[in-house]
Amino acid sequence: SQTIHQWPATLVQPVGSPLSLECTVEGTSNPNLYWYRQAAGRGLQLLFYSVGIGQISSEVPQNLSASRPQDRQFILSSKKLLLSDSGFYLCAWTVAVSRHNEQFFGPGTRLTVL
Amino acid sequence: GENVEQHPSTLSVQEGDSAVIKCTYSDSASNYFPWYKQELGKRPQLIIDIRSNVGEKKDQRIAVTLNKTAKHFSLHITETQPEDSAVYFCAASKRDDKIIFGKGTRLHILP
């Protein structure tokens, strides 16, 4: 069965520091991968998605970037965090080619920027 | 592109009563409509979904209906229980395309 991992689970970082969040998927090949951010009490904002290694689509201009160095690994980064980057970061995956579009979320990383 | 509107943003119902959350979508090519439940501090979990070749789907106390002509779909929860308190998200997508989410409905079950 498929499993999605995210780490760290929680993170407290000062403004201006760098960020690296990692997501890995097990039990499937060539998944579509997604990064979402959720501010406290708000909805799901799609940040990036990837349909394959090295293929990244950005949904919202910001000081974040994403990379997909391996088929089942998706990384979210920032060179300098802002206070507004605080939130709950969720990685998600879907089967790349299927008539089914079920999307499953990882456990999330709660980021607090101080 | 696709746009999903969800109402209400907040809903309070007495325990044991029914709750209904409604969504509309804009892209007539969308053919997959999932619903997610997010408990406080947790990840969204897929609870039920419906495809455009089906008008209604039921799973115990949860049911979803789809009206393709009107581009409406709804989540119905019957005999609500305290553990139904959560934020619910509807979504829509086309095959091989990203899922577009509604803004969510915070459901409170009152004792």
Image (cartoon, coloured by chain):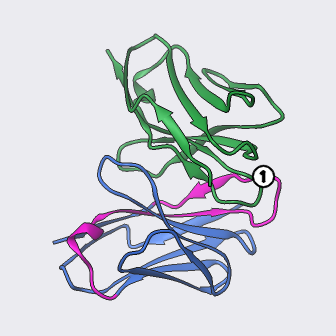
Q: Position of residue B22 (x, y in %)?
A: 54, 27
> At x 35% / y 48%, what residue is drawn?
A42
Q: Residue at x 64, y 30 (%)?
A: B73
Q: Position of residue A77 (x, y in %)?
A: 41, 82
Quarter containing the C terminus of chain A: bottom left
Q: Is residue B108 above or below residue B90?
A: above
Whether residue B81 sits left or right of residue A17 in the image: it is right
Q: Is residue A92 above or below residue B73?
A: below
Q: Nearer the viewer, residue B89 or A112?
A: B89
Task: Name the one closer to the observer, B60 or B74.
Answer: B74
**Range covered by the magenta-colored residues:** A79-107
The verdict on residue B30 being magenta is: no
Pointer 1: what residue? A100
**Residue A93 sits in quarter:** bottom right
Residue at x 68% of width, y 50% of height = B93
Left/right of residue B108 with respect to residue A30 in the rendered view: left
Q: Which chain is green?
A: B
Residue B41 location in percent, x, y?
A: 35, 50
Tint of chain A: blue
Q: What residue is at 75 percent from the left and 74 percent from the top?
A: A29
User: Disc 1 marks which amino acid?
Assistant: His
